[in-house]
Image: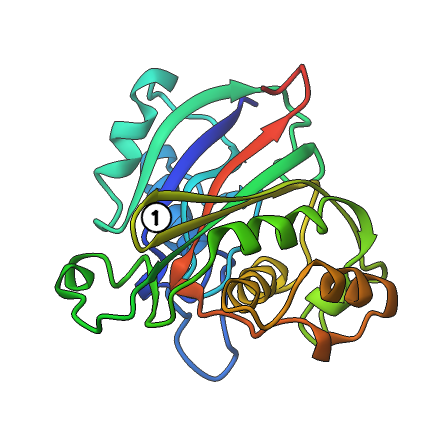
C-alpha cells in the first residue's frame, strides 16, 4: 500500500496544536492533525493516521511541517495537494505531496529541524503595522541589541544538557540535545528574527531560548549566564517562555533517502 509524504503550512492561531486531542467528556479539540485526517479520509475513502514530524503547541505556526500517511487512493500524487486542500479550512494548506518508502517515519527519520521566532521591538509605542502581523509576531517595546543577542546565541550551539531551557514536567528521559545553529537576523529596523536548528527540542525549549535572547538584547543576560544554565540546569537563570504566536516551524530535514 503506498505511503505519502506531505509538506504542510498552517496558521496555528485557532488550533489546539498539531496533535489530535479527544477528551473523553467533551467534543474533540480543533487540531491540525484532526482536520488533516478528516480531509484525507474524504479523499482516500478510508480513515488513516496522518503522522507529523513535530507536535507543535497551540498557537504555533508552520510553513515546513512534514507528515505522512498510508492509504490507497485514485488521486495521482501530483494532484493530491489540490484534492486535500479542497477539503481543508483556510488556515491549513498542503504545499506538496510525494511518494515515500513504506517505512518512512516523519519523526524518527528526521535528522534536523528549524524553528523561527519573530520579534518586533520598538520604544515608540506606535505599532500601527502590528495590526497586520500580530498573529505571527511577538511585540516588545524594549529596544533590543542584536549584537548582544548574537553573542549569547553562540553559546547555545553544540551538544548540551538543556534542562534549564525546558518546561517543568517536560516528560523526556534525557534533556541532552544538539543545536546545529542559533542565529539572530535583523531584516529591518525594529525587527529581530531568531532561527534555531537542531536534532530535536524539548517542550517549550525554543520559546525559552527566545526569551533568554530577548533578555540578552535588553542587557539583562549574557553568554556567561547561558553557559552557567547549561552547566547547572537551573531554569531560574534563563529567560521567560515567550508566547507561542511568534514561533513557526520552518523546515524538517531527512537523510539521503528522504530529502
Q: Nearer the viewer, residue 4 or 242?
A: 242
Whether residue 49 is visible, yes or no, is no
Whether residue 222 is visible, yes or no, is yes
The residue where tag 1 is placed is 10
**Residue in view at x 64 percent, y 26 percent:** 254
**Residue in view at x 63 percent, y 69 percent:** 221
**Residue in view at x 58 percent, y 19 percent:** 259
Q: Is residue 224 above or below residue 107?
A: below
Q: Nearer the viewer, residue 172 or 192?
A: 192
**In the shown orientation, is residue 118 left or right of residue 14?**
right
**In the shown orientation, is residue 23 left or right of residue 173?**
left
Residue 84 location, quadrant = top left
Residue 240 in percent (x, y) is at 56, 75
**Residue reaching furthest to the left:** 128
Residue 1 in percent (x, y) is at 57, 23
Neighbourhood count class around disc 1 (C-alpha, 10 Å): few under 14, some 14–19, many 20 upward: many
**In the shown orientation, is residue 224 left or right of residue 52?**
right
Residue 101 in percent (x, y) is at 62, 19
Q: Nearer the viewer, residue 136 or 85?
A: 136
The mark total stands at 1
The figure's colour scheme reads rainbow
**Residue in view at x 58 percent, y 57 percent:** 206
Residue 63 in percent (x, y) is at 39, 40
**Residue reaching furthest to the bottom:** 25
Q: Secondary structure at mark 1?
A: strand
Amino acid at each position: 500500500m503506498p505511503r505519502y509524504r506531505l509538506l504542510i503550512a498552517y496558521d496555528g492561531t485557532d488550533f489546539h496544536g498539531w496533535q489530535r486531542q479527544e477528551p473523553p467528556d467533551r467534543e474533540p479539540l480543533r487540531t491540525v492533525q484532526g482536520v488533516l485526517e478528516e480531509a484525507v479520509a474524504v479523499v482516500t475513502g478510508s480513515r488513516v493516521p496522518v503522522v507529523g514530524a513535530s507536535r507543535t503547541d497551540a498557537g504555533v505556526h508552520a510553513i515546513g511541517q512534514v507528515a505522512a500517511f498510508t492509504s490507497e487512493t485514485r488521486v495521482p500524487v501530483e494532484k493530491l495537494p489540490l484534492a486535500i486542500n479542497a477539503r481543508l479550512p483556510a488556515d491549513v494548506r498542503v504545499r506538496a505531496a510525494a511518494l515515500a518508502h513504506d517505512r518512512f517515519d516523519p519523526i524518527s527519520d528526521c535528522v534536523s529541524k528549524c524553528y523561527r521566532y519573530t520579534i518586533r521591538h520598538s520604544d515608540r509605542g506606535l505599532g500601527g503595522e502590528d495590526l497586520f502581523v500580530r498573529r505571527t509576531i511577538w511585540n516588545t517595546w524594549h529596544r533590543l541589541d542584536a549584537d548582544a543577542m548574537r553573542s549569547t546565541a553562540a553559546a547555545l550551539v553544540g551538544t548540551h544538557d538543556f534542562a534549564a531551557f525546558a518546561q517543568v514536567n517536560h516528560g523526556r528521559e534525557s534533556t541532552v540535545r544538539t543545536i546545529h545553529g542559533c542565529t539572530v537576523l535583523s531584516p529591518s529596523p525594529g525587527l529581530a528574527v531568531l532561527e534555531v536548528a537542531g536534532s530535536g527540542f524539548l517542550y517549550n525549549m525554543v520559546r525559552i531560548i527566545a526569551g533568554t535572547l530577548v533578555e540578552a538584547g535588553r542587557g539583562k543576560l549574557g553568554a556567561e549566564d547561558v553557559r552557567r544554565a547549561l552547566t547547572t540546569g537551573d531554569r531560574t537563570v534563563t529567560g521567560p517562555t515567550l508566547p507561542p504566536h511568534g514561533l513557526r516551524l520552518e523546515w524538517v530535514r531527512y537523510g539521503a533517502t528522504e530529502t
